[in-house]
Amino acid sequence: MLINTLFLGRFGSSKIDDELLMRIEAATKKPVHHFLKREIFFSHRDLHSILNLYEQGKPFYLYTGRGPSSSSLHIGHLVPFIFTKWLQDVFNVPLIIQLTDDEKFLWKDLKLDEAKALSVENAKDIIACGFDKKNTFIFSNLQFMGECPSFYGNVLRIQKSVTFNQVKGIFGFGDSDVIGKIAFPAVQAAPCLSSTFPFIFGNEKVPCLVPCAIDQDPYFRMTRDVAPKLGYLKPALIHSSFLPSLQGADTKMSASDLNSSIYLKDTPKEIKNKINKYAFSGGRETVEMHREKGGDCNVDISYQYLKYFLESDEELIKIEKAYTSGNMLTGELKKILIESISKIVKEHQTKRSKITDDDVKEFMTPRKLT
Amino acid sequence: MLINTLFLGRFGSSKIDDELLMRIEAATKKPVHHFLKREIFFSHRDLHSILNLYEQGKPFYLYTGRGPSSSSLHIGHLVPFIFTKWLQDVFNVPLIIQLTDDEKFLWKDLKLDEAKALSVENAKDIIACGFDKKNTFIFSNLQFMGECPSFYGNVLRIQKSVTFNQVKGIFGFGDSDVIGKIAFPAVQAAPCLSSTFPFIFGNEKVPCLVPCAIDQDPYFRMTRDVAPKLGYLKPALIHSSFLPSLQGADTKMSASDLNSSIYLKDTPKEIKNKINKYAFSGGRETVEMHREKGGDCNVDISYQYLKYFLESDEELIKIEKAYTSGNMLTGELKKILIESISKIVKEHQTKRSKITDDDVKEFMTPRKLT
């Protein structure tokens, strides 16, 4: 978790410490999610302010998003959604999910229609995570911009408050970048202003908590700069680290390399083969050496994945002890992971197969939430 | 008309010459507008291509716009609209008018609601010019962006094709400009693509002719660069020079200096006072010298305004002769202008007073045109 520590130091977000975890448990009267205990969500900005609001019975909402760059998500993409669902469940608050199909159109070799179609496909995967239909609004930028004038209005208000110099510093844009990319950060920022959604919040200025992967922090650092100028509280944030690729820790899964990730569309056989073939092992060169010295959980991808996806703390500790002591071999560890991931993927596929186009339409209709 | 000649040389548009005027008359079987004969509309790009289409019975449409920066237009603002109405009448084609309230929000110290309200006020002045309701669609960017996803789609397609370097070169943007300004040119360009208006043009790619004041040419130079990359013809253009301010030729009327212009809201008394007090005179210092040497029509604002607003060629020539020979004094010339402008403004006010909010709504409703 070295990069996490580096991040906290460099960009001035705050570590999620035991005290904060205890405060969350006290406020929600529920045990915290294992993503919090295991420092997968490890960093935050202003989470205390959100807890203050919650304790005072005042409203806030959740906002997260997804850039639909491929038709199937990989299991790393699930992490923020699993956690966001947990947040929605324990806090019982409205949730807004932005599909940045405009961003993918600008950055990728995609046509508008292709980007829109990916939004619908991704929406199904997201809905399959079990979000509460009565309290969740999912929107595609390409569609919602043409449905709700307050969205464009807030995008403009942000675009009027941010200079090229600023986005150059934050995102590294240069003079040869297209103007669509330069303007886009405001589109991701706008949903942090509750007035973007008058059909949900009316005229009320409702504060916002954004669960997201750590690479999205620059967008919200920018938003936190701008929001007070427009009369809003800074959005609060809670950041996750990345699920590493099968090939090794401290790398991000890539949608362009099918063997770097396990996809939600993969068959049990594909999952088994990928893990057996590619999952980087922290085991020793020979069985003898492994029995003697034990495996290294810090670099072992199978163990790392179990940290994300095995809910039982007890089991995880048992596995860690057995692997570190050399009692458990890499093959045995991989077998546990294969079972665990196959089960998650299969359950997801079952749920997803039941999501109809009508469900997608309902989630994506601008409407009042409860 | 020195700046006009300079413009043609520098930016490579074409002069509207006698041959082209004759071609327009032959095609439309109508005498050309006096704005054309008097070189007020003096420059074009690809007008011959539009005439080719017209002669072949193929469709094209007109697109022009207005940046609603003040609640009342001045008479200079009328010029492109008077001419556009004439184009619509003689060619009988659909007309699209963009109100760039988003631009004014970005550039001026205006709130979103103020910018939107100016759009409605300006729409009334524009409608009062007599446009055909069945064949004219007026839209405010702030409103239409939230009504029609194809608008945002085409804005993005253009924003994906234009770099910061390009808008820097064309519009002189710098690193300290806000990203809204940098992105805006695509919003003005998008209506040149007929697919922005599927409710009017369906799937047909219909070419576009843009009548505009010469200062808007940079937007359409940019658009002409981009359009072919997106599978469209370059928009054709026809450019007007500026009505000079009361204070002197070769200056532009300014909405911020009430005494530089005659507003469509001005009373007869205000019009009389402004012209008598401020209209720069080409007359001589004393009556005796004027009688001897005659006035200079080239710098005389009253004469210049009559070139714009006095339709009768005969009368204009008579006035020119009388003034140049010294027979007509500045006071007499001003009297003619006062009568002429007062009549135009009064007629405009009468027409405008009859425009209802329902009329505005009808013109601004996305719909099929005839």
Image: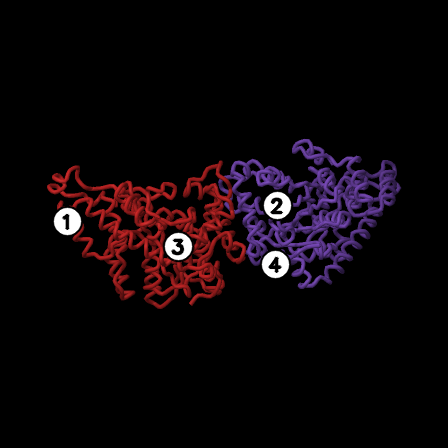
Chain colours: A red, B purple
Residue at 42%, 47% in the rendered image: A70
Q: Amino acid at mark 2?
A: Leu
Task: Name the chain under label 2.
Answer: B
Question: What residue would you read off at disc 4?
Answer: B117
Q: CA distance from mark 4 to mark 3?
A: 42 Å
User: Quick check: marks 4 and 3 in contact, CB under 8 Å?
Assistant: no
Q: Quadrant of the C terminus of chain A?
A: bottom left
Q: CA distance from mark 3 to mark 1?
A: 35 Å
How packed mark 4 is, by other alpha carbons closer than 10 Å (few <14, some 14-19, many 20 or more), is some
Q: Amino acid at mark 1?
A: Ala
Q: Is residue B266 left or right of residue A268?
A: right
Q: Is residue B193 left or right of residue B182?
A: right
Task: Say which of marks 2 and 3 sits in front.
Answer: 3
Task: Say which of marks 4 and 3 sits in front.
Answer: 3
> Is label 3 in a helix, a strand or a loop?
helix
The one nearer the camera, A235 or B97, is B97
Question: What residue would you read off at disc 1?
Answer: A322
The disc at residue A125 is 3
User: Quick check: marks 3 and 1 in contact, CB under 8 Å?
Assistant: no
Q: Amino acid at mark 3?
A: Asp
Residue at 31%, 42% in the rendered image: A251
Q: Amino acid at mark 4?
A: Ala
Q: Is residue B33 left or right of residue A252?
A: right
- Callout 3 and callout 1 share a chain: yes
